[in-house]
Amino acid sequence: MKPEYYRLQLYSSAEVLNEISLAEQHETAFGAPYYHIHQADLLDILLNKIDQLDPDVIHLDCGGTSYAETDDGVTLNLTGGRNVSGDLLIGADSINSAVRAQMLGNAPATYANQIAWRSTVPVERLPEGFMDLSCTIWCGPQSHMVVYYIRGGELINFVACVDSDDWVSESWAQKADWEELRADFDGWHDDIVTLISAVDRDQCFPWALYNRPPRPDWSTERVTLMGDAIHPTIPYMAQGAAMAIEDAAVLARALAESSILADALQLYQRNRHDRTARVVHESSDNAELFHLDSEAALREAFSKRVLGGERGAWLFNYDPMTVPLV
């Protein structure tokens, strides 16, 4: 789904705090359109392409538990006692990566003192013309909600983040009572009340937000890390999946450029560290900005903020397929 605007609104009144075009202006400035896509749809696109290349390459129910690395190769031990061997192991196994734990130690991720609610709502449950083609961020004290269309306008997706000191579950599959969601956004604008009222009562999923401090060393001779396994970030720039896809592109290029595997892995991590670290840090900065304590503080902060600008150019002009690798 191609939104036309990125808009920041005040939680109580829908007052527009700031807005930027995401239509032709974005494509002209950065060379590509801005899209929203359902994660399941993106996964289907990737799986379909993999099936075209090699239908037997994906094996499910094969959680990695540990690995053994030698001069000749690397063996990944799987749940159930099985194992597989190869030249290279890429640990893309998320924030609680078993590959990372073995390589870098099993230090726990850092709780960001926030939880995120997520849900999708079919548009037919909402009033006609409920919202325009925008990505709208509703900002309020200690909380915010991002609302946008996906799946060709059939669904509205929202992610709603709330400051919380006492939540511990990282699961995306843990359900909670709808009343808890409603209570977290009590007193918000009628549009938010309407949206929450349309949510399936048994489809409310909160999860705790965690991250890790960036570090530059995530490769050995035959093992490397990718995505949330090495640079997990809270979702305040909407760049978690994008960073993993960029990682994959740069790693593929590094492997093609160097005939020595260890050198290729060093080239990959060296060229990805600074960018991914900046996304981690700026996402944390946005968490504070979106959750300022008062309407006056939110109004002042966003009225002075230049949306897009230097950061937009830095973020969206990056092309992992052409950026020089040094």
Image: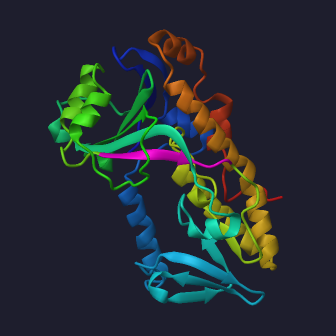
Main SS of the magenta segment? strand
Snapshot colouring = rainbow
Residue 131 appears in the figure: no
The residue sitting at the front extreme is 166
Compared to residue 274, the image places residue 148 above or below, namely: above
Q: Nearer the viewer, residue 188 or 110?
A: 110
Residue 206 within the magenta-colored segment of the rendering? yes
The answer to which of 160 and 79 lies nearer the viewer is 79
Establish if 80 lies above or below 178.
below
Q: Position of residue 320 (x, y in %)?
A: 67, 56
Residue 3 appears left or right of 193: right
Magenta segment includes 127: no
Q: Position of residue 35 (x, y in %)?
A: 45, 45
Residue at screen point 73% across, 74% down: 256
Residue at the limit of the structure toward the top, as seen here: 296
Q: How many marks?
A: 0
290 left or right of 130 in image:
right
Task: Identify which residue is drawn at 52% across, 76% down.
Answer: 64
The residue lying toward the viewer, choosing from 48 and 93, is 93
Provide the residue span drawn in magenta.
205-213
Mark yes or no: residue 295 visible.
yes
Q: Nearer the viewer, residue 68 or 224?
A: 68
Residue at position x 49%, y 80% from top? Answer: 53
In which quadrant will I find the N terminus?
A: top left
Q: Position of residue 222 (x, y in %)?
A: 72, 78
Examine the image and state in which quarter residue 72 appears. Answer: bottom right
Q: x and y percent of residue 189 in the render?
A: 29, 20
Is residue 263 shown above or below 108?
below
Answer with the quarter of the image where residue 56 lies: bottom left
- Write down the quadrant of residue 58 in the picture: bottom left
Quarter of the image for the C terminus: give it. bottom right
